[in-house]
Image: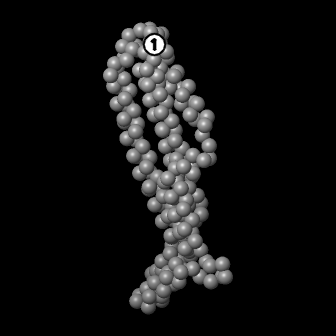
Amino acid sequence: MPGRSSSSSGSTGFISFSGIESALSSLKNFQNCINTGMDTASSVALDLVETQTEVSSEYSMDKAMVEFVMMDRELNHYVKAVQSMINHVKEERPENIPDLKLLVEMKFLALQNKNSDADFQNNEKFVQFKQQLKELKKQWKPTEDGGRSECDKIKDKEASRAGNERGTARPFSKATAPFCIPSSRV
């Protein structure tokens, strides 16, 4: 798909956008890597809540999810900026081709300036992560009346069973592990 352009700004000639479009395709494939990272961070954070690990570790996973959302948003903006530049040059076919890099940078900055916290609410994986985290925390926290949650009762039952099978059990603190070990090994 040749369009008019050349390597230097302001001159006339033809340019093939196939190299740029190929690079864009590679960038779009990178979004799969970002999605995989989000899935992994989400899984780790949920595991941390289940094992009642320190809040700082959970906070780190939350920060990682925010970073992934920001990378995803920035990558989307860059792809849109490059596609916008390609479309502009193909449609206008100017005699003197403008600085393509400058066009991309201007469009990218315009898109970045529109960033807001609402972008996080529009990211499906981030919203799902927050909802799952909230639900899991409800399951693992003590009840409001001071009683124990269903998950705590299950853990106690499993610890008791493990203690009966292997001797007296001594549980770790909740912050360390959700399981029991035989006291003879400690």
- Image quarter of residue 148: bottom right
Neighbor class of circle 1 (other Cα within 10 Å; few <14, some 14-19, many 20+) is: some
Q: Nearer the viewer, residue 102 or 166?
A: 102
* Quarter of the figure that contains the N terminus: top left
Query: Is residue 173 at least partly visible in the picture?
Result: yes
Residue at 39%, 46% (x, y): give it.
Answer: 32
Q: Residue 182 at x, y = what percent?
A: 45, 83
Q: Residue 15 at x, y = what percent?
A: 36, 17
Q: In the visual, does 58 lie left or right of 20? A: right
Residue at 34%, 30% (x, y): give it.
Answer: 22
Query: Is residue 64 at least partly visible in the picture?
Result: no
- Callout 1: SS: loop
- Image quarter of residue 87: top left
Q: In the visual, does 63 lie left or right of 11? A: right
Q: Residue at label 1?
A: 94
Q: Residue 119 at x, y = what percent?
A: 57, 46
Q: Nearer the viewer, residue 54 or 20?
A: 20
Asked if residue 60 is positioned above or below residue 14 in the image, the reply reads: below
Mark 1 belongs to which amino acid?
Pro
Residue at 34%, 19% (x, y): give it.
Answer: 2
Q: How many marks?
A: 1
Q: Residue 48 at x, y = what percent?
A: 51, 65
Q: In the visual, does 120 lie left or right of 12? A: right
Residue extending furthest toward the right: 145
